[in-house]
Amino acid sequence: MAEMIAYCGLICTDCPAYIATQANDRAALEQVAAQWREEFDAPGLTAESVICDGCLGMTGRKFGHCSECKIRACAMARGVVNCAHCDDYGCETITEFFGFVPEARTRLDGIRALLAG
C-alpha cells in the first residue's frame, strides 16, 4: 500500500484506525476507539467515529476529528498537498501541533527541503 501523508504530516496509512477500516475489522475498530477514549480523554469515541479512509480530500469516510481539524480545513482551503507545500509553513497552527507530534515536523521539514531542491 502506498504511504498516505496527511496535511499535518501524520502518516494515515500507519494509523490503526485507517488500517482497521481498510481491513473492515470491527473488533480492531473497537480496540482503537477504546484505546483513544483513554489516551485522549475522549469518552464519546466509538468504533463508528474512528472509521477513516484518510483525511485527504473530500471523499471517503473520515475520523470524527477531521470535521473540526483546523490544519485540514486550512490545507484544503489553500489547495496544498500538505502543509510542507504551504507558503505559510511554520504558522502558529501547525507549529502548535508539532509540539504534540514532533515526528510530523520532521516529515514535513523533509518534504519541504525536497521542494526547495
Image: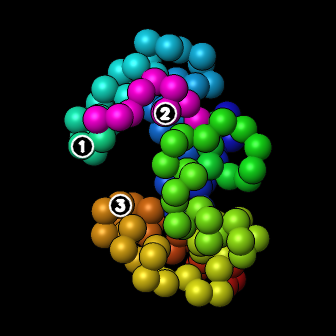
Q: Amino acid at mark 1?
A: Asp
For mark 1, what is the residue? 41
The percent position of residue 87, horizontal first and vertical second, equals: 65, 87
Residue at the spot 76% in from the left edge and 71% down from the top edge? 79
Callout 2: few (<14), some (14-19), or many (20+) C-alpha neighbours within 10 Å? many
Residue at the spot 55% in from the left edge and 51% down from the top edge? 66
SS for callout 3 = loop
Q: CA distance from mark 1 to mark 3?
A: 17 Å
Residue at the spot 51% in from the left edge and 74% down from the top edge? 109
Instruction: Give the quarter of the figure containing the N terminus.
Output: top right
Q: CA distance from mark 3 to mark 2?
A: 19 Å
Callout 3: few (<14), some (14-19), or many (20+) C-alpha neighbours within 10 Å? some
Q: Between 114 and 11, which is closer to the camera in this rendering?
A: 11
For residue 31: magenta? no
Q: Is residue 19 visible?
A: no
Is residue 117 found left or right of 30 in the rendered image? right
Residue 87 drawn above or below residue 68: below
Q: Quadrant of residue 101?
A: bottom left
For mark 2, what is the residue? 50
Q: Of label 3 and label 2, which has the lower sequence position?
A: 2
Q: Of label 1 and label 3, which has the lower sequence position?
A: 1
Residue at the spot 72% in from the left edge and 75% down from the top edge? 78
